[in-house]
Image (cartoon, helix red, strand yellow):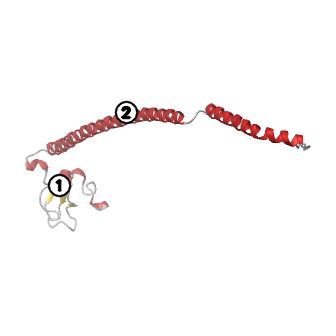
Protein backbone atom coordinates (compact mmCIF):
# COMPACT_ATOMS: atom_id res chain seq x y z
CA UNK A 1 0.00 0.00 0.00
CA UNK A 2 1.08 3.55 -0.56
CA UNK A 3 0.99 6.14 2.21
CA UNK A 4 -2.32 7.56 0.97
CA UNK A 5 -3.78 4.03 0.61
CA UNK A 6 -3.66 3.28 4.36
CA UNK A 7 -6.87 2.41 6.20
CA UNK A 8 -6.61 5.62 8.18
CA UNK A 9 -6.42 7.67 4.96
CA UNK A 10 -9.45 5.85 3.60
CA UNK A 11 -11.61 6.71 6.57
CA UNK A 12 -10.21 4.69 9.47
CA UNK A 13 -11.27 1.24 10.52
CA UNK A 14 -14.60 1.50 8.73
CA UNK A 15 -13.10 2.50 5.35
CA UNK A 16 -14.13 0.77 2.15
CA UNK A 17 -11.54 -1.24 0.25
CA UNK A 18 -11.38 -3.50 -2.77
CA UNK A 19 -9.06 -6.20 -3.94
CA UNK A 20 -7.50 -6.28 -7.43
CA UNK A 21 -10.58 -8.08 -8.78
CA UNK A 22 -12.68 -5.08 -7.74
CA UNK A 23 -14.52 -6.89 -4.93
CA UNK A 24 -15.13 -4.78 -1.87
CA UNK A 25 -13.63 -6.00 1.38
CA UNK A 26 -13.81 -4.74 4.92
CA UNK A 27 -10.79 -3.37 6.81
CA UNK A 28 -11.11 -6.20 9.30
CA UNK A 29 -10.77 -8.74 6.49
CA UNK A 30 -7.53 -7.10 5.41
CA UNK A 31 -6.03 -7.94 8.78
CA UNK A 32 -6.80 -11.65 8.46
CA UNK A 33 -3.37 -13.31 8.02
CA UNK A 34 -4.92 -16.16 6.06
CA UNK A 35 -6.20 -13.74 3.45
CA UNK A 36 -3.03 -11.76 2.81
CA UNK A 37 -3.60 -9.90 -0.45
CA UNK A 38 -3.24 -6.50 -2.02
CA UNK A 39 -6.07 -4.14 -1.18
CA UNK A 40 -6.77 -0.56 -2.12
CA UNK A 41 -9.29 1.99 -0.85
CA UNK A 42 -12.49 2.38 -2.83
CA UNK A 43 -11.87 5.10 -5.36
CA UNK A 44 -8.32 4.00 -6.04
CA UNK A 45 -7.45 3.39 -9.69
CA UNK A 46 -7.20 -0.37 -9.15
CA UNK A 47 -10.82 -0.70 -7.99
CA UNK A 48 -13.29 -1.34 -10.81
CA UNK A 49 -16.26 -0.73 -8.55
CA UNK A 50 -14.92 2.59 -7.35
CA UNK A 51 -17.29 4.04 -4.84
CA UNK A 52 -20.12 1.61 -5.46
CA UNK A 53 -21.71 -0.90 -3.12
CA UNK A 54 -21.96 -1.11 0.58
CA UNK A 55 -19.26 -1.84 3.12
CA UNK A 56 -18.78 -5.58 3.32
CA UNK A 57 -18.33 -6.48 6.96
CA UNK A 58 -17.40 -9.73 8.61
CA UNK A 59 -20.82 -9.92 10.20
CA UNK A 60 -22.37 -10.36 6.72
CA UNK A 61 -20.37 -13.54 6.38
CA UNK A 62 -22.04 -14.89 9.47
CA UNK A 63 -18.93 -15.10 11.64
CA UNK A 64 -17.70 -12.46 14.02
CA UNK A 65 -14.21 -11.23 13.12
CA UNK A 66 -12.89 -11.74 16.65
CA UNK A 67 -14.01 -15.38 16.43
CA UNK A 68 -12.19 -15.74 13.09
CA UNK A 69 -9.05 -14.30 14.60
CA UNK A 70 -9.43 -16.55 17.63
CA UNK A 71 -9.81 -19.61 15.39
CA UNK A 72 -6.77 -18.56 13.34
CA UNK A 73 -4.71 -18.03 16.50
CA UNK A 74 -5.92 -21.32 17.92
CA UNK A 75 -4.89 -23.08 14.70
CA UNK A 76 -1.46 -21.54 14.90
CA UNK A 77 -1.14 -22.56 18.54
CA UNK A 78 -2.13 -26.12 17.64
CA UNK A 79 0.53 -26.11 14.93
CA UNK A 80 3.06 -24.78 17.42
CA UNK A 81 2.09 -27.43 19.95
CA UNK A 82 2.62 -30.15 17.33
CA UNK A 83 6.00 -28.67 16.46
CA UNK A 84 6.96 -28.41 20.13
CA UNK A 85 5.89 -32.03 20.66
CA UNK A 86 8.04 -33.10 17.70
CA UNK A 87 10.91 -31.04 19.07
CA UNK A 88 10.52 -32.66 22.49
CA UNK A 89 10.64 -36.10 20.87
CA UNK A 90 13.78 -35.13 18.97
CA UNK A 91 15.35 -33.71 22.13
CA UNK A 92 14.51 -36.93 23.98
CA UNK A 93 16.16 -38.96 21.20
CA UNK A 94 19.15 -36.65 21.32
CA UNK A 95 19.40 -37.05 25.11
CA UNK A 96 19.36 -40.84 24.68
CA UNK A 97 22.16 -40.59 22.12
CA UNK A 98 24.17 -38.25 24.34
CA UNK A 99 23.71 -40.64 27.27
CA UNK A 100 24.93 -43.49 25.06
CA UNK A 101 27.96 -41.42 24.06
CA UNK A 102 28.65 -40.64 27.71
CA UNK A 103 28.60 -44.34 28.51
CA UNK A 104 30.94 -45.04 25.59
CA UNK A 105 33.36 -42.34 26.71
CA UNK A 106 33.25 -43.68 30.26
CA UNK A 107 34.04 -47.13 28.88
CA UNK A 108 36.90 -45.71 26.81
CA UNK A 109 38.22 -43.92 29.92
CA UNK A 110 38.11 -47.17 31.88
CA UNK A 111 39.93 -48.97 29.08
CA UNK A 112 42.61 -46.29 28.95
CA UNK A 113 43.05 -46.51 32.71
CA UNK A 114 43.39 -50.30 32.44
CA UNK A 115 45.82 -49.94 29.54
CA UNK A 116 47.87 -47.42 31.54
CA UNK A 117 48.04 -49.81 34.48
CA UNK A 118 49.06 -52.70 32.24
CA UNK A 119 51.71 -50.60 30.52
CA UNK A 120 53.21 -49.70 33.90
CA UNK A 121 53.30 -53.37 34.89
CA UNK A 122 54.91 -54.34 31.57
CA UNK A 123 57.44 -51.54 31.94
CA UNK A 124 58.42 -52.72 35.40
CA UNK A 125 58.70 -56.31 34.14
CA UNK A 126 60.90 -55.19 31.26
CA UNK A 127 63.18 -53.25 33.60
CA UNK A 128 63.44 -56.34 35.87
CA UNK A 129 64.25 -58.58 32.87
CA UNK A 130 66.95 -56.21 31.66
CA UNK A 131 68.51 -56.14 35.13
CA UNK A 132 68.40 -59.95 35.24
CA UNK A 133 70.15 -60.19 31.87
CA UNK A 134 72.86 -57.66 32.68
CA UNK A 135 75.97 -59.13 34.32
CA UNK A 136 76.91 -58.16 37.84
CA UNK A 137 79.67 -55.52 37.68
CA UNK A 138 81.32 -56.83 40.87
CA UNK A 139 81.53 -60.25 39.28
CA UNK A 140 83.34 -58.70 36.31
CA UNK A 141 85.70 -56.91 38.69
CA UNK A 142 86.48 -60.16 40.51
CA UNK A 143 87.07 -62.00 37.23
CA UNK A 144 89.34 -59.27 35.85
CA UNK A 145 91.25 -59.05 39.12
CA UNK A 146 91.72 -62.83 39.19
CA UNK A 147 92.85 -62.89 35.54
CA UNK A 148 95.20 -59.97 36.16
CA UNK A 149 96.73 -61.71 39.17
CA UNK A 150 97.21 -64.92 37.16
CA UNK A 151 98.85 -62.98 34.31
CA UNK A 152 101.19 -61.22 36.75
CA UNK A 153 102.17 -64.59 38.25
CA UNK A 154 102.87 -66.02 34.77
CA UNK A 155 104.95 -63.00 33.82
CA UNK A 156 106.81 -63.05 37.13
CA UNK A 157 107.47 -66.78 36.74
CA UNK A 158 109.01 -66.15 33.32
CA UNK A 159 110.81 -62.89 34.03
CA UNK A 160 112.27 -63.70 37.42
CA UNK A 161 114.79 -66.29 36.04
CA UNK A 162 115.75 -63.91 33.22
CA UNK A 163 116.32 -61.02 35.61
CA UNK A 164 118.43 -63.23 37.89
CA UNK A 165 120.55 -64.32 34.91
CA UNK A 166 120.96 -60.72 33.79
CA UNK A 167 122.05 -59.64 37.28
CA UNK A 168 124.68 -62.37 37.42
CA UNK A 169 126.13 -61.14 34.15
CA UNK A 170 126.35 -57.53 35.27
CA UNK A 171 123.28 -56.03 33.65
CA UNK A 172 121.28 -53.67 35.69
CA UNK A 173 117.53 -53.60 35.46
CA UNK A 174 116.29 -50.32 34.09
CA UNK A 175 114.70 -48.17 36.74
CA UNK A 176 111.14 -47.30 36.17
Res. 48 in view: yes
**Residue visible at 12% across and 44% down in the picture:** 64
Q: Point out the residue furthest to the left here.
A: 62
Q: Is residue 42 above or below residue 32?
A: below
Q: Position of residue 36 (x, y in %)?
A: 20, 56
The percent position of residue 70, horizontal first and vertical second, equals 17, 42
- Disc on res. 90: none
Relative to 52, does residue 162 appear above or below in the rendering?
Answer: above
Rendered image quadrant of residue 122: top left
* Quadrant where the image shows the N terminus: bottom left
Packing grade of label 1 (10 A; few <14, some 14-19, many >=20) is: few
Q: Position of residue 3 (x, y in %)?
A: 31, 60
Nearer to us: label 2 or label 1: 2
**Residue located beneath label 2 in the image:** 110
Precedes in sequence: disc 2 or disc 1: 1
| Image x and y of residue 134, in percent | 55, 36
The answer to whether any part of residue 176 appears in the image is no
Give the left or right position of residue 61, taking residue 126 as reference.
left
Circle 1: element type: helix
- Contact, CB < 8 Å: mark 2 with mark 1? no
- Could you tell me which quadrant the C terminus lies in? top right
- Answer few, some or many: residues within 10 Å of disc 2's Cα (few below 14, many 20 plus, some between 14 and 19): few
Task: Name the foreground residue: 101 vs 163.
Answer: 163
Mark 2 residue element: helix
155 relative to 134 in the view: left or right: right
Q: Which residue is mark 1?
A: 35
Q: Quadrant of residue 77?
A: top left
Rounded to the nearest angstrom, the CA distance separating label 2 from label 1 is 62 Å
Residue at left 67%, top 36%?
A: 147
Task: Name the one closer to the observer, 35 or 153.
Answer: 153
Amino acid sequence: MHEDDSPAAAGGAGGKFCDPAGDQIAVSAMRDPNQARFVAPIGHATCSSAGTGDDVSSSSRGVNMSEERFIAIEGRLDTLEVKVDRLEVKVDRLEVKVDALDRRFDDVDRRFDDLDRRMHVLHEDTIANIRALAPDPEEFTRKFTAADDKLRQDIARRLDPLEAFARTRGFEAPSS
